[in-house]
Amino acid sequence: MDKLFSMIEVEVNSQCNRTCWYCPNSVSQRKENGEMDPALYKSLMEQLSSLDFAGRISFHFYGEPLLCKNLDLFVGMTTEYIPRARPIIYTNGDFLTEKRLKTLTELGIQKFIVTQHAGAKHKFRGVYDQLAGAEKEKVVYLDHSDLILSNRGGIMDNIPQASKANMSCMVPSNLVVVTVLGNVLPCFEDFNQKMVMGNIGEHHISDIWHNEKFTSFRKLLKEGHRGKSDLCKNCNNVSVQTEDQYDYVL
């Protein structure tokens, strides 16, 4: 039986205030919209608690988590139900004030990955410069030029489409995405939800992870058969090809 995933990305909201040229939000619309129902999030936490989940959990897919009105509630529930997990926030930083950073840290966030994306002036730069040493250590501050861009499974025509069809990928062996409505995806590149593996409102996330569809997909990608998957055949992301790269997460 395959080992359990070590990372989970939860789409607590679908909205983003930016439409960066290298993001699918600039060319398409999410299939699901809105915010996750707190009852559904609680169910996910109960499922992860039953697994004693101790990996990385983050609060995004293609949305900006700080736009989620229930973010504090969700972070607090995460700390309560899966205290051994590592909660991280990936954010564009536009709404991350020093006060919000302190509040979310107190609720359990261990790290903030803040990216100064292309476009409008970044207000967080001033906030970051004023942070005390201990607070600044909680933040990884990136410029958009630091990002390794992918074509998002072939969606982004303006990013080189070089074929990687015969290269292995370990993303679906280490990570799951849970969408706003509870659908489980095997990869953060699956913007259009081509490979829904199940729904946490209908099945336990462990059962979804170990079902035949997901297991077969992981095997396919491990063996380098991207060309056999509609989701992966045009993908140029080769950032995770071995087990020891699984926690790269940008």
Image (cartoon, grey):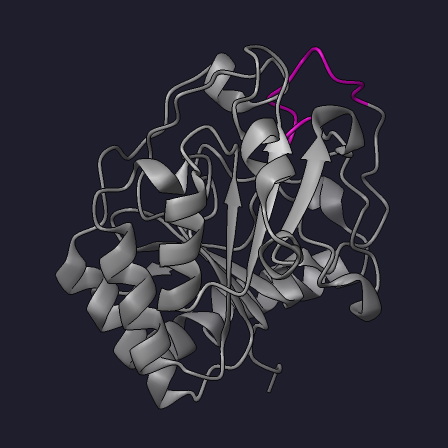
Residue 84 visible in the snapshot? yes
Identity of the residue drawn at 73% across and 45% down: 226
Q: If the image is split into quadrants, where does the C terminus sit?
A: top right
User: Is residue 157 within the magenta segment?
Assistant: yes
Tell how many labels.
0
Q: Residue 70, position in %: x, y?
A: 21, 50
Q: Residue 198, position in %: x, y?
A: 35, 60
- Magenta region, main secondary structure: loop
Q: Is residue 21 above or below residue 183?
A: above
Q: If the image is split into quadrants, where does the N terminus sit?
A: bottom right
Q: Is residue 70 above or below residue 202?
A: above
User: Is residue 192 within the magenta segment?
Assistant: no
- Which sits in the foreground, 24 or 193? 24
Q: Is residue 218 left or right of residue 167?
A: left
Identity of the residue drawn at 78% across and 21% down: 161
Q: Is residue 81 left or right of residue 73?
A: right
Q: Is residue 150 above or below residue 237?
A: above
Identity of the residue drawn at 58% across and 46% down: 131
- Which sits in the foreground, 163 or 106? 106
Q: Residue 48, position in %: x, y?
A: 37, 78
Identity of the residue drawn at 29% across and 46% down: 180
- Which sits in the foreground, 34 or 161? 34
Segment tinted magenta in the rendering = 151-161
Residue 233 visible in the snapshot? no
Q: Residue 31, position in %: x, y?
A: 32, 31
